[in-house]
Each structure stands twice: as C-alpha cells, then as structure tokens.
Amino acid sequence: MADLAWVKDHLRPFTAKRILIIIVIGLAVRLLLAPWTSWTNDVYAFYDGEMGILAGIGPYGNAVYTYPPLFAVLAYPFVLLATLFQDPSAFILFQPTMVDMASSTGMLTPYVTSPEFNLAIKMPMILADLAMAFVLYHFVAKRKGDNAGFAVLVLWFLNPLVIVTGSVQGQFDVIPALLAVVGLISFIEKRYLVSGAVFGLGVLFKLFPVYLIIPLAIVLIVQLIRDKEELRERAMPFLAFVIGGAASLVTLLPFVLQSGVIMDYILRRGSYTGYGGLNIWFLFPGISSDNVRVDGVQSVSTLIPTLVLVAVIVISALLGLLTYRSLRSTPDDRERLLVRMAVLVLAVVLLAGTVTNPQYLVWLFPLLLLLGIWDGRMERKMSVLTIIGLLYLFSLLSMFALYYPLASFTDVVSITDTNVLVQNYLNGGGIITRQWMQTFMGGVGMIVLATLLVGSEKDLLDKAWQRFRGWVRA
C-alpha cells in the first residue's frame, strides 16, 4: 500500500510544474466522469432541492431534500448557470423500466438527472477536492518541506474513493470535511474565532463536525477553569471560538424565516433507522430497526441510535480532557496531539454509528494524511480503507448502477442493458454473494478503523503488514 514515505521515495523532487500536472490529471478525471455518472437516489434529492430554490419555495419545499441547507445554497449558482445551457425541465428524465428495480432495492430512483445538472451539482465537490489538496499541501509543506507536501497532495487528489464519492456518486462529504480540517488547523494556529466560524459552517453541511467541536471546546473550557489567575486572558480563546460558531448560524436565518420545520429536516440526517456498513454493526446490513422491538414495545430505532449518540458525545468529551492533560505536559507536541485527537474522535464516530457508508471515510482521510506527518501508519490505513470503501460501495448494487446517466442520455449503453447488468449482479449466486461481500468488507473496515485507536506498538495489523512487506522484499 502507498504511504507518505513510499510516495516521497518514488516521486521526483517537488516543482510547481509537477503539482500542476497532478492537478490537471485529477481535474480531468473528475470532469470526465461527473456528467455521466451518479447514484440516482442521492442526486435526485439535490435536484429536488435546487428546483425548489428555482421555484421560490426553498430547498425544503417538497420535503425530499433533507440535508442541512448550505449545500443547496452553494450548488445553486452552478445550477443557475446550467439553466443558460439547458431548460430546467430537461434536467431530469423519468425511466419507467427502472421503477421495479428502484422499488425492490430502495437504493435507486427512476428519475435520472442530466449530464448538465450532474456537472453543475458536482462542481462544488470538485472545487472542494482541489481546495483540500492545497490545504493539506500547505500544512504539511510548512512543517516537513515541499516534497512531503507534494506527496500528501498526490495521495489526496488522486485517491480513487475521494474521486468516486464526489465526482461519480455525487455526495458532498468533502465540503464539510474541508471545513472541519480548516477549523482544526485554525484551532491549532490559535485563530479561535475563525475556527469556530468554520466549524459552524461545516455543521450546516453535515452534522459530524459537532463531534470535533465538543473535545476542542472541552480543551478551552478546562484551560479556562484551571487557570483562574489569568481568567480574562484565558477566557478570550473560548469566547472567540463560541462567537465564531454562533456567527455562522446567521446563515440559517433565511431558512428559519421561510420554514419553521427546518431543524426537523437537519436533525433527521442524524437519526437513521438501519444498521450496517464499515462499523461494529457490519453483521446487520439492510436490517431496519423499525421492525425490531425491545420488550415488544419500544422500537430499537429510538433506543440504540440515542445510546450511540450519547456514548459518542461522552467519549469525545473525554478525549478532549485527555488531550488537555497531554497538552499541559508536552506543549511542544500540541499539533500532533490535537490532530491525533481528531482522528480518534472520527474513528469512534464511524465505528459506533449505526450506519457507516463508504463516503463517510472522506471525513477521516484528510486527518489521516495530517497525522501521517508523525505516524507513518496513517497513509497505509488510508490506502486499505480506500480499497475497502470502493469494494463495499460497488457491492451494494454493482458499479453498473452508477452508469444510469450515461445510459439515459447517450447511445453508449442502453437503460435495458444497464438494468440487466444490475439485476444479474443482484441475482448472482456462487461463493461470493452480494451479502457476503458487504458483511466481509464491513468487518474488515471495522477492524482497520479500530486499529486507529491504538498506538503503533499495539497495532497487530500494521505489524503483520510490515512483516509481509519484509518477506516480499527478501
């Protein structure tokens, strides 16, 4: 597997020309794939939100778009630009032959968005990929030199799962991940007002940055309590962090005024009623907790997710306390400790969450690359998780399920042929079945994520890899 040291050894010395070549390659791949691919069920929700804005009823007007509001706002200028080239009525095409499959799988919709709309909705994701590449490069190059920064840029911008998540599947996880990374770096650099504001904006895309805000706030709160003799001076970082976060909430005001139920839509994203994925629930893919009862009365859907939420919040707070103790004893190691804390928090979130989809790994990958400055295991973990995430994603309906825009708007492949390919995969038997693949990949993913919680001396998986690599080289 590729890691930072391997990339540094096998790349020529950094030059501006070489970084430009990587950017051009990464952008070319993304722009080639973006118009002709999508996970129809995901992108249809974005389509409905954008059409709601165009119609003047807002993204929540039809109750299909249920994400926090800022992605709909961010994508709107690109969609508006697309209306100059295509009538909005042509942004989507109904495919009757997909109805049965969509109904039986619950993971597709027979409404397929056009290449123009797909490109418009994915442009913010592509630009966020690019921005993340430069943020990571700048942070690493400042500390380890240009060659190390260039290696991290390559590992991020050419990562297949990163490309597939945004430019193929059409999920915008990279945007809140970018804001979380910028928020963490700002915190590390003691720009607390900026950190709070950026983290707050991240929450308005997806809720997961909250889990990073908690331990960072704990660090500042404990620092404030412990240093009473410098109360005024110590209070300023915490106040700046809180004020920055509160200021970001102003962006919600137009939506609150337009819809009184906006918080219901936002919080709905954190209350799944299923289990499975790359987590401790990997043995239960597709099981709906609505059908399981505790004592014949209380639904697990209202019990386990709540317990998980409370547990993760408590663990995040404890990690903040532990990090503060380490910061006091080893102030020179502050950056590594804060990045390590962020990795631990997100590893716990992904492991404990009732549903951990492959695209959620994009939250973690930038932090692994940052921590890789101090811990060489992290890039290897990222490489393994990339493979696992792709295999899990394709195991859901096969990679052919991503080709519906290509089949709907070109003659390269037909809708009928695409349906047959997907259906053959769903009906396939043999030793390696769809359910077996999901369960196996979920279990392996859980194990790899769990190794992030231990130090290198206790990481049996990495030790096994090192021995295998040594055996191959011998």
Image (cartoon, rainbow, N blue to C red):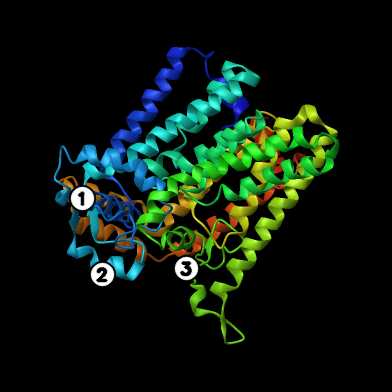
| Amino acid beneath label 2 | Asp
- For marks 2 and 3, give the CA distance: 18 Å
Q: Name the N-terminal-most of marks 2 and 3.
A: 2
Residue receiving disc 2? 100
| Amino acid beneath label 1 | Ala
Residue at 73%, 48% (x, y): give it. Answer: 319
Residue at 44%, 49% (x, y): give it. Answer: 252
Residue receiving disc 1? 407
On-image quarter of the C terminus: top right
Q: Name the N-terminal-most of marks 1 and 2.
A: 2
Query: Quick check: marks 2 and 3 in contact, CB under 8 Å?
Result: no
Residue at 37%, 38% (x, y): give it. Answer: 124
Q: Name the N-terminal-most of marks 3 and 1.
A: 3
Q: Where is residue 148 drawn, in percent x and y?
A: 59, 21
- For marks 3 and 1, give the CA distance: 28 Å
* 361 vs 337, nearest the viewer: 337
Query: Quick check: marks 1 and 2 in contact, CB under 8 Å?
Result: no
Q: Sort mark 3 into few (<14), some (14-19) or many (20+) by Cα contacts within 10 Å.
A: some
| Amino acid beneath label 3 | Gly
Report whether 242 appears left or right of 153: right
Residue at 30%, 34% (x, y): give it. Answer: 31
